[in-house]
Amino acid sequence: MKALLKTELHKALKNKYFFITLIIASVIAVLGAINRINEYQSVLELVNADKAAHGGVSWRNPYLPADTLFTYWIGGECFSLYFSLYFLLIPLFAAFPYGWSYFMERKNGYVKNVITRTSKKSYFLSKYTAVFIAGGLAVALPLLLNFLTVSCFVPARTPSVLYSAYTYVVFSQMWSALFYTHPFVYVGLYLLLNFAFGGLIACLCLAISFVIKNRVAVLVVPLFLMLCLNFANTYSRSWELSPINFLHPGVVVNPANGWIVLLEGACLFAVSFGVTMWRGQRDDVF
Amino acid sequence: MMFFKLAYFDIKNSFNLEWKKLLVVPIGFLTVCFPFYLRYAKIGAGGFGDFWLYMFGGIKEYTYDDAFKFPVIWTVVLLYLFYITLYYPYNDLLGYGQNVLIRSGSRFNWWLSKCLWNAFAVVTFFTLGAALVALFCVFTGGPLSTEISPLMYTEVFEMAADIVYPSYTVGTLIGMPLLTAVAISQLQMLLSLWLRPIFSFGVTAAILILSAYYLKPFMVGNYAMPIRSVEVIPNGVSPQNGVIILSAIIIACIVIGGIAFKYYDIINKEN
């Protein structure tokens, strides 16, 4: 099991699709960072111009507690093209690195070689773990890169709840208290949440591989599933149903509710893990 | 003669292979129409034009005064259409299509046939969609006209209430989204020659989001959003310019694809 897991992780994290996905997602994340850093520079210029005009004293409110790292990184802003593009493409970023692997291994006969040497249970547990980690990293690492890039240019002031109209984290948002008291913990939790959902979405591809016999469909179905949840969201006026929106730490449409996030995560896990282990052990690969 | 045989084969073959994907279309359209009817019939919306605009209207211009929300229904409907047209040419090239290509004797004809198939698939999707919406209207008693209920703009698309919005022509309401879909679908097929289909699909998704974000004439997705037409808003995109730009994209895709495919390495593609 240990050797198999090591092999699977090696295949998952050292394949060209993982790197291609990381590069594409990172480009979007870095462009998003540059966009917001430029925005912050123009805000600073306005503040400095105000100070210069009034003998070194700001006459206007500079809104400093609203202009912080936590409102300028890709997870804190809701205005740029990049945040929208990134969070919409999360299902593809998660699926592409390794979500297709079982489909291809069954197609080219690799599975037959593995399960004659080890148990099906070990193979699918290792596969599930590797797919989960690859999908999670592909989603979370570019976000971390964006956060670190922005943190080099924008100060990490603790956001003030008095400026909640500008921070897009409202009272009813999941973990909102942490945002205004321990924002690094809030960001860390959201990075973990993105990692977990990235992994679960990738594992959903693994489960879909048992049902659909088309590689592109295996990768695209989770995206359509997320978009359908987004459509359902247009009829929800109170809580966020769509992972595309609730994976963003700010409120894009509706505030995220921890129970809904947990429920959707549990459903994704139950379906992906259940189908993988049940069908994986039951289906004949020969 | 050979070209028509090829085109006929592609249409027949793709239908045999991909008909299951079309089954989702009625389910999808009805899933969108039914909640819309329950929610907006009371404000007088329920005609063909209202349903169609709800699906293909898009989103009003983004003005940076609130969080950006991409048009979900518009994106889902178009992405599903682009998913339908995504895989067949690539799959055909790696399989039985190679034999057809050799027998046809002309790579350009093979490519042209795929372009024709692609356009045919988009037209079929729109025809099926329009028929379903019309059928839904018949059942719910809505008028079969392109007339738009005035409250659609303010209630559904959250546009300014102090403007008198004009009625659409069939060209703007149905024709422009159709032409835009043909152009983007051809572009996606062209990109699949160099990128893997999943990447060209990602590029297509990016084009749609870019178009939703920027109201610019060269962001071609804008032509598929009737509420961004110059007939509706003063800074909107002109359908006349759209026809020229989209036709140019279609012709460019056919020509560039034809030339590129002439020198295309099919054998290595399989690896």
Image (cartoon, coloured by chain):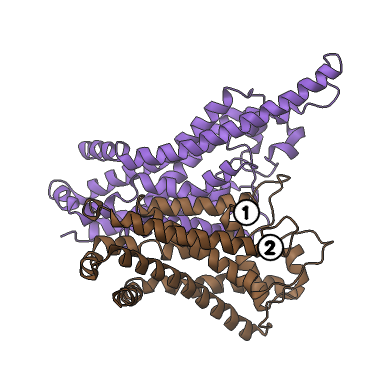
Chain colours: A purple, B brown
Q: Callout 2: residue from which chain? A: B
Q: Which residue is mark 2?
A: B227
User: Residue A97, labelled with which disc?
Assistant: none
x and y percent of residue A94 in the render? 42, 46
Locate the N terminus of chain B by quadrant.
bottom left
User: What mark, if any, has residue B217 been given in the picture?
Assistant: 1
Q: Chain of mark 1?
A: B
Tag count: 2
Q: Residue at x 47, y 35 (%)?
A: A142
Amino acid type, callout 1: Pro
What is the crowding at mark 2: few (fewer than 14 residues within 10 Å), some, or many (at least 20)?
many
User: From mark 1 to mark 2, how far is it between C-alphas?
Assistant: 14 Å
The vertical placement of B227 against B219, above or below, is below
Identify which amino acid the numbered label 2 is placed on: Ile
B160 on left or right of A167: right
Residue A16 left/right relative to A50: left
| Residue B234 on image: x %, y % | 75, 58
| Left or right of A10 in this view: A118 | left
Task: Say yes or no: labels 1 and 2 on the same chain.
Answer: yes
Q: How crowded is the residue under tag 1: few (<14 C-alpha within 10 Å), some, or many (20+)? A: some
B31 or A84, which is in the foreground? A84
Identify which residue is drawn at 21% across, 66% down.
B102
